Amino acid sequence: MGRKIPFPQANCLDCAPRILEAAGWAPKGASTKEIAAAVGMDPRQGGYYANLGDWIKILAPSPVAPGFYVPTRAGWRILAAPPPDRLHLVKVMAVSDSILGGAAELMVRGGLDASAAAGLISKAVAEGRCRSVFGATMTRRIGCLRSLAWSLRDLAILSAHERLETLIKFECLVGA
């Protein structure tokens, strides 16, 4: 079982390219406060967006600067892409995640009700990806999951093959 990441509480996937830029252009990465400033959020929300980046594997905690986040290999590849393509690549990474992609597919098929969203969050807990969430915290996470799924619905209709082709093209952006 890997490191547990808090289930995403961020609800604006469109902010992800700015999060990457903040972390990528700073010498030691970005703190959660700097991440919040990059997306125009309250400082306490910086952690929500750092965790979202970590969840979709575009950010990771810095190995040399505690409390800071740096781009992952995939995050650096997104930053190497032309700016107009970055959000699309972030969304492909997000929809490739079994939980976020599953939520987006449910959204496309007629909606993601609270029960289905709670089931996906419980699946993430059972897989050991995050800690258990209950009560009001679960309600907030359901709202965030539904918001993220809404922003991913356009990619959920792509086949797994089409998503893979995009990721292969993405891998080739920096000659890896």
Image (tube, helix red, strand yellow):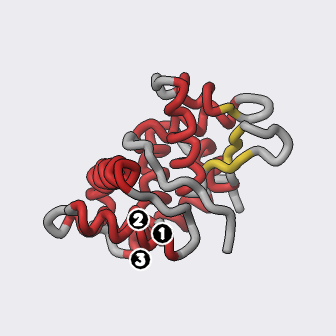
Residue 2 placement (x, y as % from top left):
68, 69
Left or right of residue 154, residue 35 in this image: right
Based on the displayed image, in which of its 4 quarters is residue 37 positioned?
top right
Spatial separation of the CA atoms under disc 2 and disc 1: 5 Å
Left or right of residue 147, residue 171 in this image: right
First in residue order: circle 3 vs circle 2: 2
Q: Note whether residue 148 is visible.
A: no
Q: Secondary structure at mark 2?
A: helix
Q: Residue flagged by tag 2: what amino acid is it?
A: Ile
**What residue is pinned by disc 2?**
121
**What residue is pinned by disc 3?**
161
Residue 65 placement (x, y as % from top left):
82, 38
User: The C terminus lies in which quarter of the figure?
Assistant: bottom right
Spatial separation of the CA atoms under disc 3 and disc 2: 26 Å
Based on the displayed image, in which of its 4 quarters is residue 175 positioned?
bottom right
Between tags 1 and 3, which lies in front?
A: 1
**What residue is pinned by disc 1?**
124
Q: Note whether residue 12 is visible.
A: yes
Front residue of this view, candidates 140 and 161? 140
Q: Residue furthest left?
A: 110
- Please report the residue visible at 36 percent of the width from the left and 54 percent of the height from the top: 135
